Image: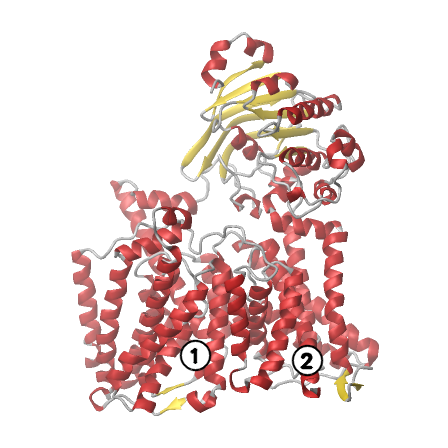
Amino acid sequence: MTHKLAVANLNAYYGQAHILFDVAFTVAPGEVVALLGRNGAGKSTTFLSIMAMVERRSGTVLFEGDDVSRLPTYAIARRGLGFVPENRRIFADLTVEENLMVGRQAPRPGAPGWTPETLFALFPNLAEMRKRPGGRMSGGEQQMLTIARTLMGNPSLVLLDEPSEGLAPKIVEQMAAAILTMKREGLAIVLSEQNLHFARLISDRAVILEKGRVRFSGSLAELEARPDIRDAYLAV
Amino acid sequence: MQLVFVQFMTGLASAASLFLVASGLSIIFGVTRIVNFAHGAFYMLGAYVAYTLTDRFTGAFGFWFALLAAAAIVAIVGCLLEMTLLRRIYQAPELFQLLATFGVTLMVQDLVLLIWGPEDLVGPRAPGLAGAVEIFGKRIPSYDLFLIALGPLVLAGLWLLFHRTRWGVLVRAATLDRSMVAALGINQKWLFTGVFGLGVFLAALGGALQIPRDAVNHGMDLRIIVEAFVVVVIGGLGSTTGAFVAAILVSQLNAFGILVLPKISLVLVFLVMAVVLVVRPWGLFGTRPPPAQASIGMAVRPWRPLAPGEIAVAAAVVAAVALMPLWLGHYALTVASEILIFVLFAASLHLLMSVGGLASFGHAAYFGLGAYGAAFVVKAAGLPMLAAIAAGPLLAALGAAVVGWFAVSLSGVYFAMLTLAFSQIVWSIAFQWVDVTGGDNGILGLWPDAFAASPAAFFWLTLAVVTPALVWLHMVIFSPFGYALRAVRDSELRAEAIGIDRRRVQWIAFVIAGTAAGLGGALFAFLKGSIFPDVMAIPTSVDGLVMVLLGGVETVLGPIVGAVVFKALAMWLISQTDYSKLVLGAVVVALVVAFPKGIVGTLADWRDRLTARRGAGPSDAEASADATAAEPPAGTMAPAPSPATVAGRTRP
């Protein structure tokens, strides 16, 4: 088993609309891969397809060597494949501690283990508002909470959907630092981003999506050397 | 003063059971988004099972054990129902969920009759609580005091469960965002089953706790479910605290209504509910519900008015029907008239639920109002039959205008519960206001005028009234108003953005549907020669829904076909078996699970498949129909079988 996650021939549909076309990429253990592309390129759909959260899809998703593409969402999550959705989706009426409680899973051998206390150390802002309902937190705090909540499941790989979206520059820095800490703990991460600068801070490799197809796959250094690709698929 | 105090205590004691039932309903809805119509049936089952168990286990320990065991047994039955039936329909439109659970209610009614017999059963007194305590010089039953204390205890227990246990926190999380809970590794299947079991346990306990107070009887399921609907509408669906406060409110209104307005005590509750809905549409403690799945949500084949050739066919059908008196006997003609009347009833409901997307569970009220209206005109004003048939629907229109004004401010399950509650109020007025309506004895002697006295003549009269009404309803569907109504159904926001006043359009549709139903009711009064409150009870409303569903909720002609088939089947069934509700309930459940497109919808599918096979290529209609109905093609991954995938929060 060389790959933590290997996605191949992934196709996804919303009703009659074909969204993803044979998307394929791999993630090595402990590696951070940036999934780049403009709005609507299919980044979120790729994550939702991996998690079995779209209406209809086809293809294979190998996680730690096992095909998880026929499993229901919860069973995929139970294997240690964590998912942090875009637009946060925290439980607004639940307190910070209760949100974390929902994400809790048993410790997993070979994956970094987290407790509320270690997560409060990772995101100190959260430690000060343990009893606050999620709905009464700022966007940045909610983003931290949604990541912390997924980490409570002690995943060995996390799909992070646009963690820097809509955050103030200062919070983005904190977020990048937290993700680097997660990486140091040995967590493999797939990060979807529109913000190339942010992706550059933390990623080892990049996969570029456009209109539901993979247009580029390689190291960030290779991407730096190809401004044409950057202009064609990333520039706004 | 003392009387007021006694009534107050009685009201508080009654509130306990009502709270248990309503909170169970609320909890189940919160997580599964299903309004469990069968909740009243579980309440009744709890009472019956407790009756049997208290018979076996006597003594103080035996009695309390029996109550808890009864609730537990019924909860297990509830879990089995959830696993076998509800899991199949979590993704179905809410109308189907309501109907399926109503089907279960019907089946339970006959099963209870089979197991426990038709008599009211009087359970034992609670050991140690059989006496009374003197407060302010009045003797208050000590069991009532126990119930009064129990309500807050259960509320506190539920609060602890939902805030101090992980399971409870998961339930609250699932109430907020089901698919996110799944993405965090929680198997919702068992969460749903557990929640359903808890809700049913509460309902059954509520029923079991009633046996020392009231005789166990067959009417208790529908009575409690209507009250529970009123409670959750007032308190806010999904809120346990709301259920508690509203249960006390409703019970007190009932207790004092008897003192103040003995004839029409339920009107008080109705007035309070109306006020609450105007001030807070989602109840005292409720929050705006997440956007519901549309009442009819499967691919709708594009509708079109009848083509000239089809109009000729329809005219030929009417002509053939008009010739039926030539070869049908008297009884068959009476049956045929009744079927025609229910065709109109189903078509009027179709306008509301299929065209308007508003599934009314109380449409019988307007049918009944039309019938009573006609009866009043004959009895009070002494006018002839035709004048009565013309005037009867006016009362229905008036009733629909009042109820509709409140009802259209809500949609989805709230609309269904509200229309049901209103129809029960109309029913109870007819039942209680004996001076005017004759109460249970009804109004008799409503015979047709001489020219329509023979079954054949009355049949022709019915046909002459029903046919133009159907044509008119058809024209309404394909008028600009009908398009606006469908626009509002399909997307409230977009419709309002192009200047359609949603509430006004839906209110007008409600009045049109109510008036057309009232016309059917007026004919019905003269067909039967009498009118009783039962004609506007829940079963008639549900019959209408089943007719539309059987015919095909997404089709234009569905209600006509559905009404003919259903009415003929139901009449035949009643003549064949004493347990027609059991069969009917099973048919309803089977329809929802296995045959949701109805007769016309399925025929249209076959026709499309045939034309496609002939090489004509799939039409747009078929393509869109298949998109949602068809299984994924071979070789694709099946979507996860959990409800997570339908939460509709995903986006490209």
Badge 2 marks a residue whose secondary structure is: helix
Task: Choose mark 1 or mark 2, whichever is in front.
Answer: 2
> Which part of the image, by quadrant, shows the N terminus of chain A?
top right
Q: Residue at the top extreme?
A: A225
Please, what is the three-letter code of the amino acid marked with disc 2?
A: Phe
Q: CA distance from mark 1 to mark 2?
A: 44 Å
**Residue B609 visible to an observer of this rendering:** yes
Callout 1: few (<14), some (14-19), or many (20+) C-alpha neighbours within 10 Å? Answer: some
Which residue is more in the foreground, A33 or B512? Answer: B512
How dense is the environment of label 2, judged by Cα within 10 Å: few (below 14), some, or many (20 and up)? Answer: some
Viewer-closest of B602 and B197: B197
Instruction: Return the chain for callout 1.
Output: B
Callout 1 amino acid: Ile
> Of B342 and B284, which appears nearest the observer?
B284
Viewer-proximal residue among B487 and A12: B487
- Residue behind mark 2: B8
The image shows residue B387, relative to residue B418, as above or below, that is below
Residue sitting at 78 percent across and 89 percent down? B137
| Numbered disc total | 2
Q: Which residue is mark 1?
A: B574
- Residue B263 image offset from top left, x and y in percent: 52, 86
Residue B124: x and y in percent read 74, 84
Query: Which structural element holds mark 1?
Result: helix
Q: Is residue B520 visible?
A: no
Mark toward the start of the polypeptide (1 vs 2):
2
Q: Residue at x 30, y 48 (%)?
A: B608
State which quadrant residue B554 falls in: bottom left
